[in-house]
Image (tube, rainbow, N blue to C red):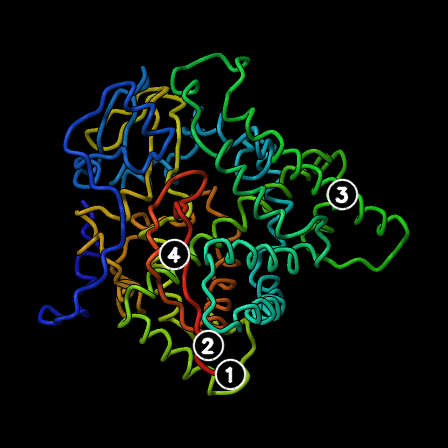
Amino acid sequence: MSDMGMGDTECVGVDNPVKPFVPPAPTPRDKPVGRLELIRIIYRNPLELWGEPSYNEPWVEVDWMGMHTIIANDPGLIRHVLVDNAKNYRMAAVRQRILRPILRDGLLTAEGEVWRRSRKAMAPVFTPRHIHGFAEAMLERSEAFAERYETPGLVTDVARDMTLLTYDILAATLFSGEIAGEPGQFAKEIDNLFETMGRVDPLDLLGAPDWLPRFTQVRGRRSLAFFRKIVADTVAMRKARMAKGDDVPNDFLTLLLKTEGPEGLTRAEIEDNIITFIGAGHETTARALGWTLYLLAESPRERDIVEAEIDAFMRKGPVPPHEWLDNLPLTRAAFEEAMRLYPPAPSINREAVEDDRYRDLKIEKGSTVLAMPWTIHRHRLHWKDPDAFIPARFHPENRGRIDRFQYLPFGAGPRVCIGASFALQEAVIALAVLLSRYRFDTVSQTRPWPVQKLTTQPQGGLPMKVTPRRK
């Protein structure tokens, strides 16, 4: 049993009178629920389903709707499934029923040879050299976006704002500003898409045949068509420039289009991967940024620490933006702690291809294994004060106490998020720009409730007052 992270709050101080902020989260259940209640909870908000054993035991075995399910909270078991014996596990069927209608053969949902070709095609874009090259555009877009907060006494939905900001950064970096469509409409449609197709349909839980129409998918078809049209128009614009021999940017879009052909990706696979990065790619970072600003607003002591670090850094004079991540470890720690409490992707689902065993746990063929960042990140065996916002866990002197497989904001193993370094660099640059200029405070209407759709979203948004700190 891993006890990594158990000492990670020592730096807070036992006698410190300032208690850390405990943000809103569902109370673990103390008894099982019936079948109809189970379906209702999973459709409405799966985060409200988990009971006390999921936060206290290394693993829990349950039978749901005829499926044997193992909720894996032990870092060793998670490593076994995602890394050591990954070849024996495929994407779980229920997860694929939710995501494949949206992403089809994008990197998050593709399997086998299609996944390997896509991963190989995209790997060059996400090398450290390329990611560092995106930093200047990340800084420019963050600074331009920050200008909208100059209105005195402004109260704005920060959750929606961060969606617009990360979309803007994604468009400027991976697509060189050439995504078709209007950002405001994009934000509206992605909310609708995740509200409809981004949740479990009751028919999936009941094992209904695939040909039977899902109500959630029917409701989301218009938004999905909107995204598909954006992608088709974006590809057509770039292909036309390439055909004319124009000097096109060597970005993510160009690189993908150059892989089209018998030995590379099909046009459909290219469009599926663009959908994946436009939709899921920017959404996860946006949610984590919004939660970070909220948690800091409710934790004045932690906000003072982050603001002081950023202010001191800014006073040094110009530093290349690709070096900001390494120079702002406390800002990064606040962002990482926000992802611990509100993991952007709150579940990792796998299905056993053949019988397997981990220690005294028998994993039968067809069993579903859930590695749930939501419960792992709040587990009593692995974290001290697990429900509290304590960025010091991720300060440089404490990071070594955290097991690699007890903290999974970007997944792990062969399918670890290819854009993890991109997201961390983007987030720290955006936070440094915003917090150097403004202070974000909650208002009476700020009452977020975490809801799991494709990401961990704040129900009701994050209305916050934005006040200029200095020019």
Residue 226 left/right relative to 241? left
* Front-most of residues 407 and 354: 407
How far separated are the C-alphas under marks 3 and 2?
Answer: 39 Å
| Observer able to see residue 412 | no
Dot 1 amino acid type: Lys
* Front-most of residues 289 and 90: 289
Q: Which mark is residue 233?
A: 3
Residue 290 is drawn in which quadrant?
A: bottom left
The residue at the point 48 percent across, 29 percent down is 98
Q: Residue furthest right?
A: 244
Q: Residue furthest left?
A: 15
Q: Nearer the viewer, mark 4 or mark 1?
A: 1
Are discs 4 and 1 less than 8 Å apart at CB?
Answer: no
How far separated are the C-alphas under marks 2 and 4?
Answer: 20 Å
Q: Which mark is residue 471?
A: 1
> Dot 3, how many residues are within 10 Å of its Cα: few (below 14), some (14-19), or many (20+)?
some
Are discs 2 and 1 less than 8 Å apart at CB?
Answer: yes
Are discs 1 and 3 less than 8 Å apart at CB?
Answer: no
Report x, y in % for residue 178. 73, 54
Q: Nearer the viewer, mark 1 or mark 3?
A: 1
Return the disc, 3 or 2, that comes first in the chain's sequence. Answer: 3
Element type at mark 3? helix
How far separated are the C-alphas under marks 1 and 3?
Answer: 40 Å
- The residue at which mark 2 appears reads as 468
Residue 107 left/right relative to 252? left
